[in-house]
Image: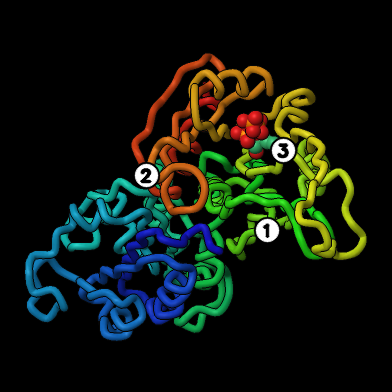
Amino acid sequence: MSILRGKNILLGITAGIAAYKTASLVRLFVKSGANVKVIMTPAAKEFITPLTLSTLSKNPVISSFTEPDDDASVWNNHVELGLWADLFLVAPATANTLSKMASGRSDNLLIATYLSAKCPVYFAPAMDLDMYKHPSTKSSLEALQSFGNIMIPVTSGELASGLSGAGRMAEPESIVSQIESHTLKELPFHGKTFLVTAGPTYEAIDPVRFVGNHSSGLMGFEIAKKAALLGAEIIYITGPSHYKTNDSRIKTIPVVSAHEMYTQVHSYFGSVDVAVLSAAVADYKPKNIATFKIKKSEATLSLELEKTKDILASLGSIKSNQLLVGFALETHDEVDNAIKKLKSKNLDLIVLNSLNDEGAGFGGDTNKVTLIDKNLVQTVYPLKSKVSVATDIMTEIQKIINA
Ligand code: CTP
């Protein structure tokens, strides 16, 4: 899954021959899961049609503040567009546009939007060899970068003029991957590895039966996805659950029993920065697993259960620099019990959910949590979707990391 998924991308197209490549660019952004809007300078329409771009982006294409030919016949608000965008890319960026961007000469919608944008701005220059070499172009490029804009460097090769040299716009695939890696580097958890446990564990009774619980695995799944969206690499160790992801930054390790989860968690813990143990691990397992299916011969059946190892507590006793987050599912004396777990398991943060709160805990798409850090500072959250709860947990983790 691309890091650009769900992002609002504003593409500004100016009048260079490389504009024909923006059809592929729009297509790649859309494929990555981004929302794309296109602004063109009026002259750019000579190189590629607004119809092509609006069809590919699934959004109207605009090129002036009030142009009647535009898909939007009302006033096109550059401030709103600038605020809408999570990132703004000007590609191709001609010498003319670069110079206007550098000097702030706001004589068209594209430049006005650039000046209004609060998001990261990328620009991919494209022009002929001699224009590219010209000192005035060089000074525009320098000025734009000194303002914090990110340049996607030109490549060398055959140019539309027939000359050969530097000045070609980077290929669309390369532009997208440069933006992806830059976006990733800017994310708060870039370079960090998270270990996340999720789901229930199943403890075998015989070859066909097990002792389990109602955990769906959704909370841990949302935590893993959110941490990945914030730039982390994830080791996602999950008990039986139907939640699956193909995000390349989430390495899924399926397990069944508490013992398997214990073994896998310990094999990765030494190499992670943060561990969030949200799995509903069985506290007890059958002492003996029957080799054959147990027949229903007697009126009653007794199972002898023995304790599983407490994975979270075992990590608390060996942790060095890792930030350790646990969960507490309680039915009474919730805060007191959660604080006891926080202390006895040597955690940095505990996520308390009470089964007394409607919509909290197992199953369902919602949760209501209280976060308690190791200084016993409590933050009580209202009932929210598990996606939003995952965001709150990540925000708290970020605070602890930055403290
Ligand atoms: N946990 C674990 N290994 C276990 C049991 C629990 O790692 N064998 C972790 C859970 O993933 C959770 C935390 O411990 O993060 C607390 O789980 P919970 O069931 O609320 O508490 P327990 O410590 O098991 O205590 P009790 O069931 O007595 O409340």
Q: Is 109 drawn above or below residue 277 in the view shown?
A: below
Tell me the SS state at disc 2. strand
Question: In this figure, which residue is indicated by the disc labeled 1?
Answer: 240
Q: Please give the count of numbered marks on the rendered protein.
A: 3
Tell me if the residue at label 2 has its CB under 8 Å from ligand 1: no
Residue type marked 3: Asp
Q: Residue at x 60, y 18 (%)?
A: 340
Which circle's residue, 1 or 3, is located before the other in the chain? Answer: 1
Judged by depth in the image, the label closer to the viewer, 1 or 2, is 1
Residue that badge 3 annotates: 283
**Side of 254 where 338 appears, left or right:** left
Q: Say above or below: 386 vs 397.
A: below
For label 3, being within 8 Å of ligand 1 is answered: yes
As measured in the structure, the alpha-carbon distance from the residue carrying label 1 to the one carrying label 3 is: 16 Å
- Identify residue for label 2: 384
Residue 42 vs residue 102: left or right? left
Q: Position of residue 347 (x, y in %)?
A: 64, 24
- Label 3 to label 2: alpha-carbon separation: 28 Å
Ligand 1: does it lie within 8 Å of the C-beta at label 1?
no
